[in-house]
Image (cartoon, rainbow, N blue to C red):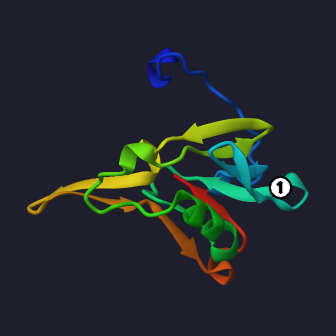
Amino acid sequence: DDKYIAPGGSLSYHEVALPSYWLIGMNNTYVDGKINHKCFEGYCPAVVDTGTSVIAAPKGQLQPMIDAIGEVKSDCSNRDSLPTISFELNGKLFDLTSDFYVIQEVTTNGTQCILGMETIPAIEAGPIWILE
């Protein structure tokens, strides 16, 4: 139904490996169009979780992306200059601007920004990426 699709967008279907967890395969990750994490044999398990407000993955896989993004200034002054990150699913890149991976909160002290990514111990979840 087109009421769920952004203007100019389209639906994309992916094979679900574990329906109870919405587990799909991810090929690679990118920062500003450059490969950032190469998944082993082109497959990283990833969970599509719209109930999670951050992107999470094992430290060894996510930390290079966090490093490539750089500092997210708490006053949000550099939010618009942060790079686009991409997740490759079935050979198609899904781009996220900082609007999607920086959490912006309005507090009594004004607007504050933080990076919406966190590393998780692989022992807890295995080598799974959680995509918001």
64 relative to 51 in the view: left or right: right
Residue 90 in percent (x, y) is at 79, 39
Number of numbered markers: 1
Q: Nearer the viewer, residue 123 or 22?
A: 123
Does residue 3 sit above or below 124 in this rendering?
above
Which residue is outermost to the left?
108
Which residue is outermost to the right?
41
Q: Nearer the viewer, residue 85 or 124?
A: 85
Q: Quadrant of residue 63?
A: bottom right
Q: Quadrant of residue 67?
A: bottom right
**Local SS, label 1:** loop
- Which residue is located at x 53 percent, y 58 percent? 69
- Which residue is located at x 71 percent, y 47 percent? 34
Does residue 75 sit above or below 10 in this rendering?
below
- Which residue is located at x 37 percent, y 49 percent? 79
Does residue 60 sit above or below 22 in this rendering?
below
Q: Give the labeled residue for mark 1.
A: 43
Q: Nearer the viewer, residue 57 or 71?
A: 71
16 relative to 6 in the view: left or right: right
115 relative to 10 in the view: left or right: left
Residue 127 in percent (x, y) is at 72, 70
Residue 108 in percent (x, y) is at 8, 61
